[in-house]
Image (cartoon, rainbow, N blue to C red):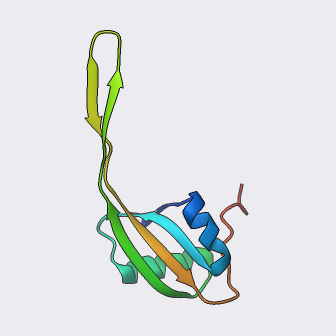
Amino acid sequence: MSILKKPLITEKVSAQNEGGVYGFVVDKNANKVAIKQAVEKMYGVNVEEVRTMIAPGKKKTRYSKGAFLTGKTSSFKKAIVKVKDGEIIDFYSNL
């Protein structure tokens, strides 16, 4: 089971990257201590603070030829991680 699923690349989080704040989509059962250890191990940085939140799924409606199709997106957990001053995480280094 991987704790870190993918980095959050949104405008809001990308604006905070210069201040040492990064976002990740994480496993729903992961706690703050496990998230901190996973980030430190994977990126080799020292984590100061971890904040977590669960984003609920949203209802979606799609129009097709014959009918309306309704569904729901999955909910997910995200973590906002603050690293020590002077340290950075480069998401684009291994592309």
Name the spot of residue 60 as percent of width and height, x first.
Answer: 32, 36
Image quadrant in which you'd find residue 40: bottom right
Q: Is residue 30 left or right of residue 6?
A: left
Which of the pair 57/39 is nearer the observer?
57
Q: Is residue 7 left or right of residue 2?
A: right
Name the spot of residue 14 as percent of width and height, x first.
Answer: 62, 65
Name the spot of residue 84 as percent of width and height, x first.
Answer: 61, 89
Figure label count: 0
Find the residue positioned furthest to the top: 66
As drawn, 5 above or below 69: below
The residue at 54%/82% (across/down) is 82
As drawn, 16 above or below 62: below
Q: Quadrant of the C terminus?
A: bottom right
As drawn, 56 above or below 37: above
Which of the pair 48/5 is nearer the observer?
48
Image quadrant in which you'd find residue 50: bottom left
Q: Quadrant of the N terminus?
A: bottom left
Name the spot of residue 21 as percent of width and height, x first.
Answer: 57, 76
The residue at 33%/77% (across/down) is 31
